[in-house]
Amino acid sequence: MQQHRTISAKQLTFLMLGLIFGPVACGLLLFWNSAPLPEPQLPALVRFDTTWIEKKDEERRLVPCIMIKNDSNSDWGKLSIGLNEQFYSTGNMRLSGNEEVAIPLETFIARNGSIRFPVGTRPISLVTIFAQMESGARGVVEIQIEDDTSKTWLAPKSTPSS
């Protein structure tokens, strides 16, 4: 009659520790030895302007907006814009090469969806643009906005500070 192979409690403990710490160690080695891939830079231009909008059953209004220009010949998809890393305008918008789009500032919503961008009361210091490029990669560009320019466009009724 054949005897069954058995392992001791000590051998079982080492086996279980190896099964747990082996994959964790491999993951940590990959993390420490892998360099992050840079996101491609989007060739985008930004300016602040005003535009006329018209909604159903409402009069036309002149509203402050942000103008985004695709400064390349390739198309972008899934365009998203962030203001001050807090307010976002996202959607499945496409932007053809060398095309501009105007997005009213009042359409930007806080990350948690609770409030809209307070037009005229909060200066814009950083604009972040995300878009899917033709290659399928997500391109990103961050544009710093100077205080004087931001105040001029966001609060046109007040005088800009010198």
Image: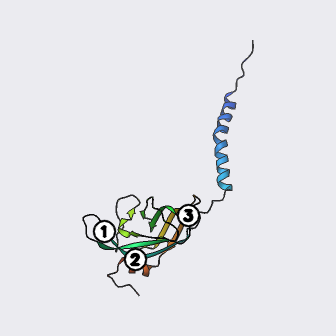
**Which amino acid, mark 1?**
Glu
Secondary structure type for disc 2: strand
Query: Where residue 139 is drawn, which disc sits there?
Result: 3
Please tell me which of labels 3 and 1 falls first in the chain: 1
Residue 29 in percent (x, y) is at 68, 51
Quadrant hosting residue 1: top right
User: Is the residue 31 above or below the residue 123 in the image?
Assistant: above
Q: Is residue 138 left or right of residue 52?
A: right
Residue at x 67%, y 51% (from the top left corner)? 30
Residue 69 in percent (x, y) is at 49, 72
Quadrant hosting residue 105: bottom left
Measure the C-alpha gap from mark 3 to mark 1: 32 Å
Measure the C-alpha gap from mark 2 to mark 1: 17 Å
Out of 95 and 78, give the one closest to the viewer. 95
Residue at x 29%, y 72% (from the top left corner)? 61
**Label 2 belongs to which residue?**
49
**Which amino acid, mark 2?**
Asp
Residue 123 in percent (x, y) is at 40, 74
Badge 1 crowding class, 10 Å Cα cut-off, few under 14, some 14 to 19, many 20 or more, is few
The residue lying furthest to the top in this view is: 1
**Label 1 belongs to which residue?**
54
Residue at x 65%, y 50% (from the top left corner)? 28
